[in-house]
């Protein structure tokens, strides 16, 4: 059993075929998916998808690209939306200095609000970090000093120091199709080094399709391709990576009913 811990099933790329792609995911061994919120003001669309499909869960939050247009949403609103039974995470929120689509102070402000929501709810914060390693490290250290919160560094493509800082602070690290790219040798070295009990896999679909699908639309079924490369990188079997990353997912995403899905996976 595999879990796609981060995809965007609400994106128009999947209009008209969500049921089919969820079946293709199951056929590839991907039994669970978390569709990630990027606009709190569009949360109703994401929640509806999670409600429509038994094996799809969701998050609630504002992507750093949208931190400027959704500035000022109080933490209480995020916490209230997170009470829905299908909401299992906060975010994605973070810092993106590569595109800089929102003012950096708005991104940092939004990240801190989402950290507070994760702290209050106990749900994991899905962190987006791109070209912002130093500031992300500083904020994580400062905020963790105020009180612990669960979190993961999603679609990890940052430097080794941020990965190790995350591990030190109790975070998890999730790898996407970027891990499979030919020029990702440095990223694979990081993946090889991290402790097995902190690793997750994801697609970030519809983006970042792994080799050999690179350049095409990504989808949850392709989680298996990234997991295979992670297994090869770490010198373990694909079965072991599936077992470990799924165990890690349930440990972090505590709101997902673990036993129900493990029983289904064993039966299949």
Image: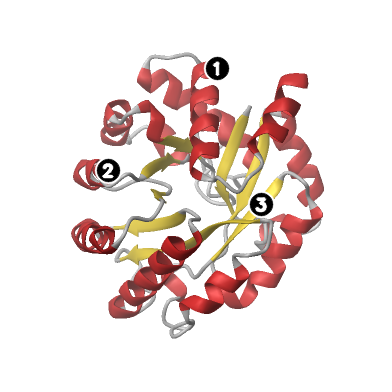
Total labels: the figure holds 3
Mark 1: secondary structure: helix
The residue identified by callout 3 is 57
User: Which circle, 1 or 3, is nearer the viewer?
Assistant: 3
Q: Could you tell me how far apart the alpha carbons at marks 2 and 1 are, in whole angstroms?
A: 24 Å
Can residue 19 be seen in the rendering of this structure? yes
Residue at the image point whose x is 43% and y is 14% from the top: 236
Mark 3, other Cα within 10 Å: few <14 / some 14–19 / many ≥20: many
Q: Position of residue 124 (x, y in %)?
A: 47, 53
Residue 243's quadrant in the figure? top right
Badges 2 and 1: C-beta atoms under 8 Å apart?
no
Left or right relative to 167: residue 255: right
What is the number of the mark on residue 85?
none
Vertical placement of 267 versus 91: above or below?
A: above
The residue identified by callout 2 is 163
Mark 1, other Cα within 10 Å: few <14 / some 14–19 / many ≥20: few
* First in sequence: mark 2 vs mark 1: 2
* First in sequence: mark 2 vs mark 3: 3
Mark 2: secondary structure: helix
Q: Could you tell me how far apart the alpha carbons at marks 2 and 3 are, in whole angstroms?
A: 26 Å
Q: Nearer the viewer, residue 130 or 212?
A: 130
Residue at the image point whose x is 23% and y is 60% from the top: 145
Q: Could you tell me how far apart the alpha carbons at marks 1 and 3 are, in whole angstroms?
A: 24 Å
Q: Position of residue 154 (x, y in %)?
A: 42, 49
Left or right relative to 158: residue 222: right
The residue identified by callout 1 is 239
Vertical placement of 98 versus 76: above or below?
A: above
Q: Position of residue 107 (x, y in %)?
A: 35, 73
Q: Nearer the viewer, residue 62 or 186?
A: 62
Residue at the image point whose x is 72% and y is 26% from the top: 263
Mark 3: secondary structure: strand
């Amino acid at each position: 059993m595999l879990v796609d811990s981060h995809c965007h099933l609400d994106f128009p790329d999947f209009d008209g075929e969500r049921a089919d792609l969820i079946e293709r995911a199951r056929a590839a061994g991907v039994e669970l998916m978390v569709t990630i919120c990027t606009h709190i003001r569009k949360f109703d669309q994401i929640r509806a998808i999670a409600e429509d499909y038994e094996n799809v869960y969701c998050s609630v939050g504002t992507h750093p690209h949208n931190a400027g247009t959704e500035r000022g949403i109080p933490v209480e609103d995020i916490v209230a939306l997170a009470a829905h039974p299908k909401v299992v995470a906060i975010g994605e929120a973070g810092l993106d200095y590569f595109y800089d689509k929102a003012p950096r102070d708005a991104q940092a402000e939004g990240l801190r609000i989402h950290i507070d929501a994760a702290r209050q709810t106990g749900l994991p914060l899905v962190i987006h970090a791109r070209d912002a390693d130093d500031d992300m490290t500083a904020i994580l250290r400062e905020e963790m000093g105020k009180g612990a919160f669960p979190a993961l560094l999603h679609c990890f493509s940052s430097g080794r120091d941020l990965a190790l800082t995350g591990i030190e602070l109790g975070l998890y690290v999730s790898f996407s199709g970027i891990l499979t790219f030919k020029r990702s040798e440095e990223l694979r070295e990081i993946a090889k080094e991290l402790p097995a009990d902190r690793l997750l896999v994801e697609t970030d679909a519809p983006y970042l399709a792994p080799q050999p699908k690179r350049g095409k639309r990504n989808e949850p079924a392709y989680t298996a391709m990234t997991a295979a490369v992670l297994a090869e990188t770490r010198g373990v079997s694909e079965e072991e990576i599936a077992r470990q990353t799924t165990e890690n997912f349930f440990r972090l995403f505590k709101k997902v009913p673990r036993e129900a899905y493990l029983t289904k996976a064993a039966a299949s």
